[in-house]
């Protein structure tokens, strides 16, 4: 167990050395000894001690009480005052800084150790409580964002369904066949978006609960990729040409050796491809590459869209986080969080490169399930 680190701030060098000797004998580590307030603040910033023993009368412009005010405000480091006596005005000033204890310079070794141990224990309890309250606040904020997001994302497709069904109900018999089909397609698209949202929410819920299943089975990767592309952009709704390429190895033996969890793969590719389409200008092409290797597969999806600002990249895979430049483009902030969870369940990795205004490239590498790598070729995908 590491020794507790203590900084001594005291203008009386003899007293400071005496206290230091007693602390070292008691098993503490004295990480510094200074006599001036500004120097003490610098030492706290650099050393981050577990506790500061603070004298009242110091050298320089700041006395111990003024120094403590700055340390408490900036570093949340516990301070115990050390003085020959605490007169009434001095004690009132010191008390206002909410120190973790008071010690007379003539205190016994037992008093010194007990006061320090109690101060550090109190500080650790307060820190734990503060972190717990912060986590609770963050959880409440996430829940509020979640409710707002779900309500907003459901409202748009529901309004579209309501509008289309009302028109079909009132004027269906008078509408031309192509107009009527267009309204039915709009209803179908809205239902599909709501289904996708529900699926995303359930997937995140499973991942948060540690229940996101991973069941690798032999599958035909080319067929799965083609199906995902068709579902995202039916031929009659195509707005972004997708250039899909794959390595020759992907054609071997009907792909029965490529063992992955199909449900998770569909989540990964569906979210990455839909993002590439959503955040690219209409008509811009998307590049989708598939590389099959002996022990892994690599998916690369490249767009020429709006790109991701550097400031947003660190939180890119956090739930509900959306880049600052998406403006009015609809979205839940769940897609990339789901991608990361699904890649992690495979034991793979997801990487990206992005430049604002130039586009983004995501590369996903998934290792193949070892237990099924050498199945007989007669297994049907």
Image: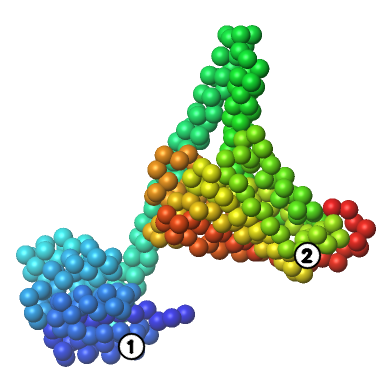
- In this view, 143 is above or below 298: above
Residue 150 position in % (x across, y down): 51, 35
- In this view, 329 is above or below 89: above
Circle 2: is it few (<14), some (14-19), or many (20+) Cα within 10 Å? few
Name the one closer to the observer, 363 or 316.
Answer: 363
Q: Are marks 1 and 2 in contact (CB under 8 Å)?
A: no
Mark 1 or 2, closer to the camera: 2
Residue occupying image coordinates x 37% and y 65%? 124
- In this view, 236 is above or below 9: above
Residue occupying image coordinates x 62% and y 49%? 242
Name the one closer to the observer, 338 or 280.
Answer: 280
Name the one closer to the observer, 83 or 351.
Answer: 351
Residue 164 position in % (x across, y down): 57, 19
Scheme of colours in the image? rainbow
Would residue 275 be found to the left or right of residue 365 on screen? left
Would residue 212 be found to the left or right of residue 110 on screen? right
Name the one closer to the observer, 284 or 135.
Answer: 284
Residue at image mark 2: 249
Residue occupying image coordinates x 16% and y 91%? 14
Residue at image mark 1: 24
Secondary element at tag 2? helix
Residue occupying image coordinates x 8% and y 79%? 60
Which mark is on residue 333? none
Residue 222 position in % (x across, y down): 75, 53
Would residue 121 be found to the left or right of residue 204 on screen? left
């Amino acid at each position: 167990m590491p020794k507790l680190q203590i900084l001594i701030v005291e203008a009386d060098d003899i007293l400071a050395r005496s206290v230091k000797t007693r602390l070292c004998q008691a098993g503490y580590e004295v990480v510094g000894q200074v006599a001036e307030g500004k120097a003490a603040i610098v030492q706290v910033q650099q050393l981050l001690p577990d506790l500061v023993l603070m004298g009242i009368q110091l050298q320089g412009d700041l006395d111990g009480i003024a120094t403590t005010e700055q340390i408490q405000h900036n570093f949340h480091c516990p301070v115990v005052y050390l003085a020959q006596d605490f007169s009434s005005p001095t004690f009132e000033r010191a008390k206002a800084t909410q120190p973790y204890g008071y010690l007379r310079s003539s205190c016994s070794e037992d008093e010194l150790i007990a006061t320090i141990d109690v101060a550090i224990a109190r500080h650790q309890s307060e820190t734990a409580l503060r972190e717990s309250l912060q986590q609770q606040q963050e959880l409440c904020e996430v829940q509020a964002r979640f409710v707002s997001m779900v309500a907003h994302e459901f409202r748009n497709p529901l309004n579209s369904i309501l509008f289309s069904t009302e028109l079909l109900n009132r004027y269906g018999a008078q509408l031309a066949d192509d107009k009527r089909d267009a309204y039915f397609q709009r209803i179908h698209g809205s239902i599909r978006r709501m289904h996708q949202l529900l699926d995303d929410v359930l997937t995140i819920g499973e991942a948060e609960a540690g229940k996101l299943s991973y069941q690798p089975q032999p599958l035909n990767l080319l067929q799965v990729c083609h199906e995902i592309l068709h579902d995202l952009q039916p031929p009659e709704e195509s707005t972004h040409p997708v250039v899909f390429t794959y390595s020759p190895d992907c054609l071997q033996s009907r792909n029965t050796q490529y063992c992955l969890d199909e449900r998770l793969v569909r989540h990964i590719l569906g979210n990455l491809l839909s993002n590439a389409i959503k955040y690219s200008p209409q008509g811009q092409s998307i590049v989708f590459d598939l590389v099959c290797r002996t022990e892994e597969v690599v998916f690369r999806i490249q767009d020429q869209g709006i790109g991701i600002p550097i400031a947003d990249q660190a939180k890119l895979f956090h739930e509900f986080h959306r880049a600052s430049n998406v403006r009015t483009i609809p979205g839940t902030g769940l897609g990339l969080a789901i991608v990361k969870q699904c890649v992690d369940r495979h034991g793979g990795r997801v990487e990206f490169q992005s430049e604002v205004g130039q586009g983004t490239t995501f590369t996903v590498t998934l290792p193949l399930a070892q237990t099924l790598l050498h199945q007989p070729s007669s297994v049907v995908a």
